[in-house]
Amino acid sequence: MVEDSVFSIANITGDISSPNLKGIAYFKPFKDGTMVEVEVSGLPGYKNYALFPIHVHDGKDCSLSKEGMFENVLGHYNPTDEEHPYHAGDMPVLFSNNGYAYMKFYTTRFKAYEVEGKLVIIHEAVTDENAKTFGRKIGCGVIKKYKI
């Protein structure tokens, strides 16, 4: 049985285009999968209500390039080489309400320990132009094991 006090956490920060973006994501073992909880504030105000794609990505860290963009972000976490939107790292979009978003969901696409060391990435809001490419990566957090 998994200890209730063990889970993974990612502190999310924004890039140069979204310096006020802050958030936290929890990944907790639950049943045969993972309970994911995400809370974010400071999402850019493209509209009062906007959809922001969020994924687990492979990558090293959330360091910024000279241009202020996340430079060590690789592709979506996809260990079984699935088509989008069936990558293990694909998650529901964040629904921003005036820059704030909260969601909680259950997934069997990955176990919490499988995403430790990977990245949580928030992309710019979905528009007609970037709906299939996800747009700029505006938020990043490294998923780390946490024990109370």
Image (cartoon, grey):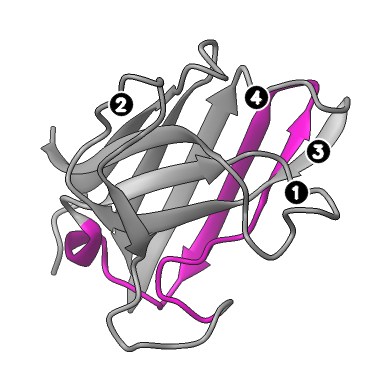
**Tag nearer the camera, 2 or 4:** 2
Q: Secondary structure at mark 2?
A: loop
Residue 20, quarter of the rendered image? top right
Q: Going from the N terminus, do you reach mark 3 or mark 1 first?
A: 3
- The residue singled out by tag 1 in the image is 126
Q: Which mark is residue 18?
A: none
Residue 61: give x, y in percent of width and height: 20, 38
Pointer 2 local density, CA inside 10 Å: few below 14, some 14–19, many at least 20: few
Q: Residue at x 25, y 43 (%)?
A: 72
- The residue singled out by tag 4 in the image is 43
Q: Are marks 1 and 2 in contact (CB under 8 Å)?
A: no
Q: CA distance from mark 3 to mark 4?
A: 9 Å
**Tag nearer the camera, 3 or 1:** 1
As for residue 113 lying within the magenta part, the answer is yes
Q: Are marks 3 and 4 in contact (CB under 8 Å)?
A: yes
The residue nearer to you, when weighing 138 against 65, is: 65
Q: Going from the N terminus, do you reach mark 3 or mark 2 first?
A: 3
- The three-letter code of the residue at mark 3 reads Ala
Q: Secondary structure at mark 4?
A: loop
Q: CA distance from mark 1 to mark 2?
A: 23 Å
- The residue singled out by tag 3 in the image is 50
Q: Are marks 3 and 1 in contact (CB under 8 Å)?
A: yes
Residue 147's place in the image compared with 133, above or below, is: above
Q: CA distance from mark 3 to mark 2?
A: 27 Å
Q: CA distance from mark 4 to mark 1?
A: 13 Å
**Tag nearer the camera, 4 or 1:** 1
Where does the magenta region start and end?
A: 86-115
Residue 101's place in the image compared with 30, above or below, is: above
Residue 66, quarter of the rendered image? top left
Residue 27: give x, y in percent of width and height: 33, 51
- The residue singled out by tag 2 in the image is 65
